[in-house]
Structure formats: C-alpha cells, structure tokens
Amino acid sequence: MTVVLDDAGRNVMLSWRHRFVPDIWNWELPGGLLDEAEAPAKTAAREVEEETGYRPRSVEHLVTFEPMVGTVRSAHHVFLARGAELVADPTELNEGKFQWLPLADVPGLIATGKIVNSGSLVGLLHVLALSGPTAPSRAE
C-alpha cells in the first residue's frame, strides 16, 4: 500500500470502497499484490498509477508489517509517495474512485470508523506520527 501525498504534502489520495466479506465501506490507500520477481517499491508505484492515474514523483519504504502474525505469514509493505503527477485515466476500475482528502482530516476519519483497513491505518498513522511535532527529523 502507498500513502500518496500531493506536492504540498497537505492532501492524501484515498478511495471510498466497499469490502464485501466484512460488509463495510471505508477509505483505503492504493495497493495491490506483488507480481512475481517484482520489487515491492516497483509494485507500489505501478499500483498507484493503475488505480489512480497518478504517477508518484518518489516512493520510499515506510514499514513492513504482518497483519495476522501468529496465524498466517503475509508481509505487507507500506510506502510513502511524495507528490504525484496525473498521467492517465485509471486502468483498474474496480478499486473505487480515488480522491484527494486533507491529511488533517485523517485522525477524525479513523476515530469515526471511516478508515479501518489495517494497511491504510498503519501507513496513515505512520505518516501522521512522522509529521507531528515530536517527529524525528528526516536527517536522523
């Protein structure tokens, strides 16, 4: 999954979509499955472009986590894209409609249960923690 921030770093790209198994609607980050022999960062950039039509200006690894540790092995890689350029219409049309939302609204969306996907939570909370007043500087 990829947290895609606009060039100013004030907005994040999310999709409002329905998940059938738990029968919930929620905001989610773009993401997808690794193709065989494809590096996770390449997958992240490809999935962003396929699902949103935007090409990330940069992609950096944030964290890898196991959402169901102790039950199954399923590493999830989360990336941060700083800036994005609209290059085409999305080619994956079953991913919901992506839109830019203020990053400042994310804590409220989480608090009201509008973001519940584990990967989205991990990525967004990670970015919020890194951008907060006690965040370590990028040089550290």
Image: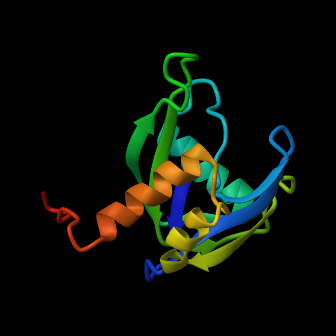
State the image coordinates of residue 48 (x, y, percent, origin top left).
63, 56
Q: How many marks?
A: 0
Q: Nearer the viewer, residue 42 or 99?
A: 99
Residue found at x 23% / y 65% = 135
Which residue is rendered at x = 86% and y = 53% of the image? Answer: 94
Residue pushed farthest left? Answer: 140
Residue 2, quarter of picture: bottom right
Residue 118 can be seen in this image: yes
Q: Is residue 59 at all visible to an observer of this figure?
A: no
Q: Residue at x 48, y 46 (%)?
A: 78
Left or right: where does residue 60 sit relative to residue 49? left
Residue 44 on image: x %, y %: 56, 47
User: Residue 4, image x and y in percent?
Assistant: 53, 64
Most foreground residue, 109 or 45: 109
Residue 59: x and y, percent?
44, 55
Quadrant hosting residue 9:
bottom left
In the rendered image, which quarter is residue 27 located in?
A: bottom right
| Relative to 56, 58 lies left or right | left
Is residue 59 placed above or below 36 in the rendered structure? Answer: below
Position of the C terminus, as image quadrant, is: bottom left
95 relative position to 54: left or right: right
* Residue ID at (57%, 16%): 71
Q: How is the image coloured?
A: rainbow
